[in-house]
Image (cartoon, helix red, strand yellow):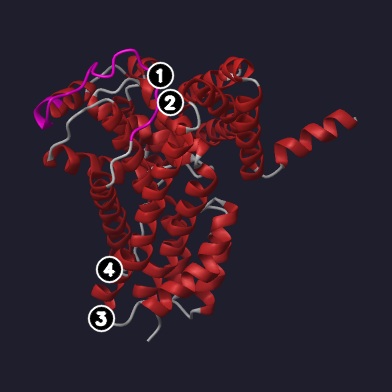
Amino acid sequence: MEKKSVLNKIMSGSLVLQIAVGIVLAVVLSLVSPAAAENSMLLGNLFVQALKAVAPVLVLVLVASALANRKASHTAQMRPIILMYLTGTTLAAFLAVAMSTLFPTELTLQVSDLSANAPQGITEVLNTMLLKLVDNPVNAILTGNFIGILVWGVALGIVLHHGSDATRQMLQDIADGVTQIVRIVIRLAPLGIFGLVAGNLAASGLSVLGEYARILTVLLGAMVIVALIINPLIVWFMTRSNPYPLVFTALRESGVTAFFTRSSAANIPVNLALCERLNLEKDTYAMSIPLGATINMGGAAITITVLTLSAVNTLGIQVDLATAFLLSVVAALSACGASGVAGGSLLLIPLACSLFGISNDIAMQVVAVGFVISILQDSAETALNSSTDVVFTAAVAAKS
């Protein structure tokens, strides 16, 4: 009974704290016993393999379920709010490309041939993407072809939207079940990250920590720019009034809570209460806030873009302007389908990586790096996403 109690405490404890402890223990182990640290890489490899197993199914069922169960809105104010959501997410992806170009980052990855499968410009990228669009769905899942998975998810969602209530409910139940499995896998992140950090430190030394710090700086810098410059500009364009009182209120009363909960979905009640205090139209914010927790994902777009381009830089793949634009669009669309669980945006990185012919094995190593820095990255990402829901809603739904 006592053992069960301890296990329950571990499974329900703070994932952020557990990851932090895992990183500290990994650094200590790598300094005390490099051989043992190198052997612990097995834990990291198992974690990466588990991510590879759940990510394709997750993308398929989440996209299909979201489209099949979508509800049409007849509120006139929803259209400009949705437009602001999509514009903000896309601009965040563009900014991430610019930041990655100005401050390029590379990662230590386990790959035998860094030049393998590197496409040469936008033409090859588009050719690869078109071929993956028409892949067999079973093969797409088996090979981790996330573009093909996305296409089948969209197609199934559109068709099943006209199916029976029972069919759509079953699809929602499957999506909920897969999401729960993902939650279990993510609870193993402290062990996996312990193994990855210890193994990488044993193999490459403390310089790996410098890589993590650099990429985290780029990510957080881009998120701050979105929160304090891009979002206010969008609001000013809509209202022609000073946006900063609203922006700071949302960051203080929504962003801080979201930073610690690390879940846009969990922060919905906080945002609804804040909208009520701001005296907004209830019929509007009652729909826009839950919707924003699903599709307003500027922080996720930044994460997907920056980490993908880190892999691209590591592999020596040349990215021209057209390819960078395509990546921004894909990252923005992918972000809108990010899972509601902590670290959900990281599982969509392989979709963006597949544009460049980067194998699923390498892409999942990048995902694992994302989990290493997620202590700050995912918290800041959620704070940006959730506070922006209120900012954009208030810009349109304020009572006269």
- Name the disc covering residue 240, or none: 3
Q: Amino acid at mark 4?
A: Ile
Question: Spatial distance from mark 2 to mark 3, Cα to Cα?
Answer: 45 Å
Q: Nearer the viewer, mark 1 or mark 4?
A: 1
Disc 2 is placed on an element classified as helix
Q: Nearer the viewer, residue 389 or 40?
A: 40
Residue 35 falls in image quadrant: top right
Question: Spatial distance from mark 2 to mark 4, Cα to Cα?
Answer: 35 Å
Number of other residues with Cα within 10 Å of mark 3, as a class: few under 14, some 14 to 19, many 20 or more: few
Is residue 6 toward the left or the right of residue 228 in the image?
right
Q: Nearer the viewer, mark 2 or mark 3?
A: 2
Q: Please determine whether, in this image, residue 313 is positioned above or below residue 287.
A: above
Point 60% across, 25% down: residue: 30
Residue 245: percent from the left, percent from the top? 42, 79
Residue tagged 4: 234
Point 35% across, 48% down: residue: 302
Cβ–Cβ below 8 Å for labels 4 and 3? no
Span shown in magenta: 106-124
Question: Spatial distance from mark 4 to mark 3, Cα to Cα?
Answer: 10 Å
Question: Spatial distance from mark 2 to mark 1, Cα to Cα?
Answer: 8 Å
Mark 3 / mark 1, whichever is N-terminal: 1
Point 26% across, 40% down: residue: 330
Residue 228: percent from the left, percent from the top? 36, 67
Cβ–Cβ below 8 Å for labels 3 and 1? no
Number of other residues with Cα within 10 Å of mark 4, as a class: few under 14, some 14 to 19, many 20 or more: some
Residue 353 falls in image quadrant: top left
Q: Nearer the viewer, residue 84 or 125?
A: 125
Q: Amino acid at mark 2?
A: Gln
Q: Please determine whether, in this image, residue 218 is positioned above or below residue 226.
A: above
Number of other residues with Cα within 10 Å of mark 2, as a class: few under 14, some 14 to 19, many 20 or more: many
Residue 317 inside the magenta-drawn segment: no
Does the image show residue 164?
no
